[in-house]
Image: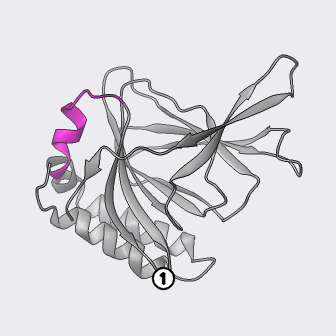
Amino acid sequence: MAKHMQHLKALREIAFDYGVGEHPDLATMARELSRAVYQNKHALADDLADLRTREKGFERWLVAQRNKPDISVLVMAWPANYGTPIHDHDGLWGLELALHGALEVESWDRGENGKNLRLTGRDWLGPGDVTWFDADDRHAHRCRNLSRAETALTLHVYGGDLAQYFTYQEAGQAGQWTKSPQRSAIAGRLYA
């Protein structure tokens, strides 16, 4: 999976160009990434075809990391109908862009004490569609591939290395949640 991907490199460069400062302009980054995906969707589909047919389950592929400012760029492969538990992003800002297929993203607010979760919105992303969140300890979300047959692919840009995070599960009574620490696994590196 070490093939050079010119169009993925262009997405990485956009992320690096706009991912500066403690609170980068995520709306502009989203617009530029989306434009690049629309313009190159067939080439990107060809570049990433191997990820759509691997059938290895949910996978995170590192595209690039940079320090000062911290930023990481990943591609994620979502098997048919796969969904994540509700999870946070360790206080990092982030942006998620659909490359192939369709994803549902539910946004949750963890409340001031971090224990009371409340659904605050839902987005549906198709190729080129983007959602983002600011650096916030209260943000959490849940994502799901909407296809029952095809692997979806997404590009993720984070304001740092999302090495660990928490998942949340409703426990017993409605409104009571437990959290469990998780560590991110990387399937490999995509050379862009």
Give left or right: position of 176 versus 15.
Answer: right
Residue occupying the far top of the picture: 172
Q: Nearer the viewer, residue 68 or 82?
A: 68
* Amino acid marked by disc 1: Lys
Q: Nearer the viewer, residue 64 or 129?
A: 64
Task: From the top left corner, tell me how far across and down residue 40 is, in percent.
Answer: 22, 60
Q: Which residue is mark 1?
A: 68
Q: Quadrant of residue 180?
A: top right
Q: Quadrant of residue 166?
A: top right
Q: Is residue 187 magenta?
A: no
Which element carries disc 1, helix, strand or loop?
loop
Give left or right: position of 69 versus 147.
Answer: right
Residue neighbourhood size for the residue with mark 1, other residues' Cα within 10 Å, grouped as few (<14), some (14–19), many (≥20): few
Task: From the top left corner, tell me how far across and down residue 119 is, in percent.
Answer: 76, 38
Give the magenta part as a residue range: 47-57
Q: Nearer the viewer, residue 114 or 152?
A: 114
User: What residue sits 57% from the left and 40% below the top?
Assistant: 182
Task: From the top left corner, tell me how far across and down residue 104 is, in percent.
Answer: 53, 37
Q: In the rendered image of this protein, does residue 144 appear above or below residue 47?
A: above
